């Protein structure tokens, strides 16, 4: 039933000005609207709604991610914009913070302005 419907993605914020700056200026997403309920961005055919909440505690897992062609190039571009990539002691990562999965995909994680964990993935 829903297999042919468009997907919408959601993350949350309790700091909407910082969140809007991060997604619009740092990540370069196209702003659609900003109202009392959400900041909405257009992502290559997908809508991302950053929900505005009074209180918010980010979950400790990945909430949203992008598939990229060249993960190291994407990391370099984001690092130049001030993004810091996460390091996990229990995981073997390269100098850029990239973990290689058993099937050779490459994954790196970073946080948005609210601490939501986002990811980049380069499939093998």
Image: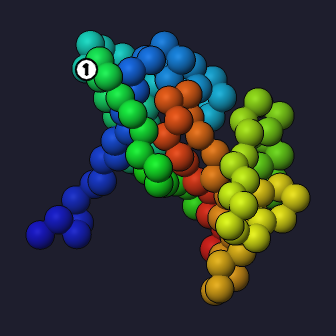
Up the image or down, 121 lies above or below 10; here it is: below
**Number of marks in picture:** 1
Residue 40 placed where, x, y %? 37, 28
Up the image or down, 35 lies above or below 67; here it is: above
Q: Residue furthest left?
A: 1
Instruction: Tell me the colour scheme of the image.
Output: rainbow
**Camera-nearest residue between 114 and 80:** 114
Residue 91 placed where, x, y %? 70, 68
Residue plotted at (77% across, 30% down): 81
Residue plotted at (76% across, 70% down): 92
* Residue behind mark 1: 37
Up the image or down, 39 lies above or below 100; here it is: above
Q: Residue furthest right?
A: 95
Q: Secondary structure at mark 1?
A: loop
Q: Is residue 66 visible?
A: yes
Residue 85 placed where, x, y %? 72, 46
Q: Residue furthest bottom?
A: 103
Residue plotted at (22% across, 59% down): 5
Quadrant of residue 47 in the image? top left
Quadrant of residue 52 in the image? top left
Q: Is residue 40 visible?
A: no
Q: Residue 67 vs residue 44: left or right?
A: right
Quadrant the C terminus occupies: bottom right
Residue 34 placed where, x, y %? 36, 17
**Camera-nearest residue between 5 and 57:** 57
Q: Residue 70 vs residue 38: left or right?
A: right
Quadrant the N terminus occupies: bottom left
Q: Residue 49 vs residue 29: left or right?
A: left
Q: Residues within 10 Å of mark 1 (few under 14, many from 20)?
A: few
């Amino acid at each position: 039933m829903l297999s042919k419907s468009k997907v919408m993605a959601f993350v949350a914020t309790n700091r909407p000005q910082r969140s809007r700056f991060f997604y619009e200026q740092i990540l370069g997403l196209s702003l659609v609207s900003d109202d009392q309920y959400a900041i909405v961005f257009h992502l290559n055919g997908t809508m991302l709604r950053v929900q505005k909440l009074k209180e918010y505690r980010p979950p400790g897992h990945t909430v949203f991610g992008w598939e990229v062609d060249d993960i190291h190039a994407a990391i370099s571009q984001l690092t130049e914009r001030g993004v810091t990539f996460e390091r996990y002691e229990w995981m073997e990562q390269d100098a850029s913070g990239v973990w290689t999965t058993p099937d050779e995909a490459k994954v790196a994680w970073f946080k948005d302005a609210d601490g939501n964990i986002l990811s980049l993935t380069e499939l093998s």
